[in-house]
Image (cartoon, helix red, strand yellow):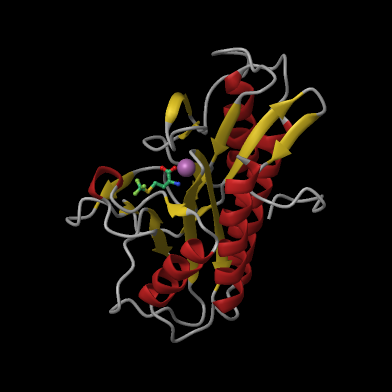
Amino acid sequence: MHRAGLVVWNVLNELKQMVRPGLTTMDFENYAERRVKEQGARPAFKGYRGYPCVLCTSVNGEVVHGIPSPKRRIEQGDILSLDFGAELEGYYGDAAVTVPVGTISPELERLLRVTRESLDKAIEQARPGNRLTDISHAVQSWVESHGYSVVRELVGHGIGTRMHEDLQLPNYGEPGRGPRLREGMTLAIEPMVNAGGPAIRILDDEWTAVTADGSYSAHFEHTVAITADGPWILTRPREIQGPSW
Ligand code: MF3
Ligand code: CO
């Protein structure tokens, strides 16, 4: 899983560095498709329940599952979520990051920071002996204490030899509920945070989730293993420590 995760991290990092005003979301799709194949891995999203692309690109008020398009040009001041998954030798990695396009407003900088921090807080709870909703609660309390809201309809998930495995991981809830976390469990932790209200709707393309009130939304994700030594972020190199993204 770590090897699959490193492919995901490599691709997302390269995509992050490409980001600039004037590119279309399809430019990122094309790059990701080429790079995942060069690394001998298979893109995990394309064909999954009929999803048409290897990448999800969600801009501004799009929460997740934005479909890349040659018509969607990103502009200075936008925020862009890049979500990518790969399978290598039967094992999966899944991660996402939201990045500024050029210079963004201080309000948007804060939304990105608080969402990334909510992922940091969540990962910190991914330890043997804790319960599943300790992770959920860590996200919700951090996000809501900063005046933002957590999306309810979409959740994190178990991951391993399939992209989506049994455990569903809400980004809200009371602590101390749900299954006990054990060594060897692997989870995709993925807070989705709206600057306005929590409600979302799905566009007519049947994929793109957008905020119901048109507010901005951010999304960060990592695949994490629960180990006796604490959380191990599988979707980045071991030598990188500190904040999740
Ligand atoms: N990171 C998303 C998830 O965990 C990506 C899924 S997009 C899909 O659900 F097309 F593959 F469904
Ligand atoms: Co995921």
- View extreme (bottom): residue: 22
Q: Quadrant of residue 176?
A: top right
Note whether 72 is above or below 21 in the view shown.
above
Question: How far from the left and from the top, in percent, is residue 184?
Answer: 66, 23
In the rendered image of this protein, does residue 43 appear above or below residue 227?
Answer: below
* Depth order, front residue of 58/167: 167
Rendered residue at 47%/67% (across/down): 32
| Residue 55 visible in the displayed image | yes
Q: Is residue 113 left or right of residue 53?
A: right
Q: Position of residue 96 (x, y in %)?
A: 53, 53
The N terminus: image quadrant: top right
The residue sitting at 27% across, 58% down in the picture is: 52
Position of residue 87 in the picture relative to residue 6 (left or right):
left
Q: Residue at x 44, y 28 (%)?
A: 165
Is 217 on the left or on the right of 109, as rendered? left
Picture quadrant of residue 214: bottom left
For the point 44% across and 38% down, the residue is 163
In this rendering, is residue 27 above or below 195?
A: below
Which image quarter holds the C terminus? Answer: bottom right
Coordinates of residue 94 in the picture (x, y in percent): 52, 46
